[in-house]
Image (spheres, grey):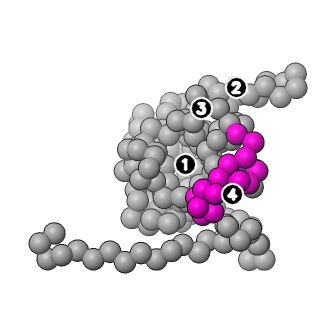
Amino acid sequence: MVSAEADDRTYRVTQIGIIHSCFKEKFAIPRQAGMAAAAVAQLELFPPYNRQEMVRNLEQFSHIWVQFIFHQTLTSGWKTTVRPPLLGGKQRVGVFASRTPHRPNHLGLSAVRLDGIDCQPGYCHLHLSGVDFLDQTPVIDIKPYLPYSDAVSAATAAPYANGDQPVISVHFSEQA
């Protein structure tokens, strides 16, 4: 259970599952979900959330939002400003103008492809692709992605977050 103090109130967030990801260390993870379509993970739901009725009709959605905890940054705390990789690590922006894991509550949000659901009594896994999760990431919520409201066609972003990624050619020798 994760707790966060706000004024005199305490808000509790319960872990509902865990990610089993192809990314075993943080340096291999794409900067955003969807950037590596072949990146896969399984989301294992914990009891009492691992029941078929909890995911009923979810298979009708191609994508879902996964809310999670940046668990490997908890001990290092949070920062007021960060250096986004797309700025070459040379300029600082406010933590809320970035998607850094070094956030006050260490919460993450990713839209990922839902490739399938495998539920049996006492067992429920969601098969995901296009992920940007570190293995063993704690999950706190799942919501369906709604194209009519979640994709904002008129949205704009700062120049450093425009989505343009450098294209790098990789050539393998025949020997490789």
The secondary element bearing badge 4 is classed as loop
User: Badge 3: how crowded within 10 Å, few (<14), some, or many (20+)?
Assistant: few
Report the quarter where the N terminus lies. Answer: top right
State the extent of the magenta-drawn residues as a range: 79-96
Image height check: is 74 above or below 40? above
C-alpha span from label 1 to label 3: 34 Å
C-alpha span from label 1 to label 4: 43 Å
Q: Which mark is residue 91?
A: 4
Report the quarter where the C terminus lies. Answer: bottom left
Disc nearer the start of the sequence (2/1):
2
Rendered location of residue 84, percent (x, y): 63, 56
User: Badge 2: how crowded within 10 Å, few (<14), some, or many (20+)?
Assistant: few
Image height check: is 165 above or below 70? below
Q: Which is closer to the viewer, label 2 or label 3?
A: 3
User: Badge 4: how crowded within 10 Å, few (<14), some, or many (20+)?
Assistant: few
- State the residue position of label 2: 3
Q: Which mark is residue 80?
A: none
Q: Is residue 107 left or right of residue 40?
A: right
Q: Quadrant of residue 120?
A: top left
Residue drawn at x 59%, y 75% as measured from the top left: 164
Which residue is situated farthest in the front direction here?
90
Rendered location of residue 88, percent (x, y): 58, 61
The secondary element bearing badge 3 is classed as loop
Disc nearer the start of the sequence (4/3):
3
Q: Which mark is residue 76?
A: 3
Q: Is residue 44 visible?
A: no
Amino acid type, label 4: Gln
Amino acid type, label 3: Ser
Residue drawn at x 67%, y 67% as measured from the top left: 160
Q: Which is closer to the viewer, label 1 or label 3?
A: 3
